[in-house]
Amino acid sequence: MIENINEFLGNVARTDLGKAARRSARTIWNAHRSAFDVTRHEAVKVFGAALEQGQRATARGRNKAEGVVEDLAGAADERLSTIEQALQQGVSRVIHRIGLPTAKDVNALSRRVDALAARVQARKSPRRSTRRAA
């Protein structure tokens, strides 16, 4: 049976129809191979373009995120500065109300004490003893 099929196919292949079918099959095969090569080449281009766009989108997103973080950090610094200033003013008012001396007051008092000490020291300068020996 297989011999009959092989013989039949051999006979068909030798006819003009068989030769035309083989040429047509070869043309179709070459067209498919060319289409596959073109598709593979274009797929590499598309993948490269997609990768490049992804990198650009990532960079844009990173830049936007950095800008937002900088804005938030600036706003936080402003708020912190405002809170710090309000706290310092409140503490100063409380210190003034209860009569505690500030660092400025202590420094001024320290300078006055140093000046008085210098004057006392100047008056105590070594003098000759006025006592007589007995």
Image (cartoon, helix red, strand yellow):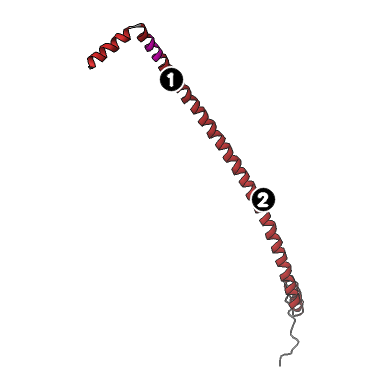
Residue at image coords 58%, 39%: 57
Question: Which of the pair 128/43 is nearer the observer?
Answer: 43
Q: Label 1: state its secondary structure.
A: helix
Q: Earlier in the sequence, mark 2 or mark 1?
A: 1
Q: On screen, 82 above or below 8?
A: below
Whether residue 87 appears in this view of the structure is yes
Q: Is residue 1 left or right of residue 60?
A: left
Whether residue 121 appears in this view of the structure is no
Residue 131 sits in quarter: bottom right
Instruction: Give the image location of residue 79, x and y in percent.
Output: 69, 59
Q: Which contiguous range is marked in magenta?
A: 20-26
Q: Tell me if mark 2 has few (under 14), some (14-19) or many (20+) residues whose alpha carbon lies within 10 angstroms of its own.
A: few
Q: Is residue 22 left or right of residue 105?
A: left
Q: Please state, as top left, top right, bottom left or bottom right, where the C terminus lies in the image.
A: bottom right
Q: Residue 71 shows which numbered tag?
A: 2
Q: Is residue 84 left or right of residue 43?
A: right
22 inside magenta stretch: yes
Which residue is disc 1 drawn over? Answer: 32
Q: Please state, as top left, top right, bottom left or bottom right, where the N terminus lies in the image.
A: top left
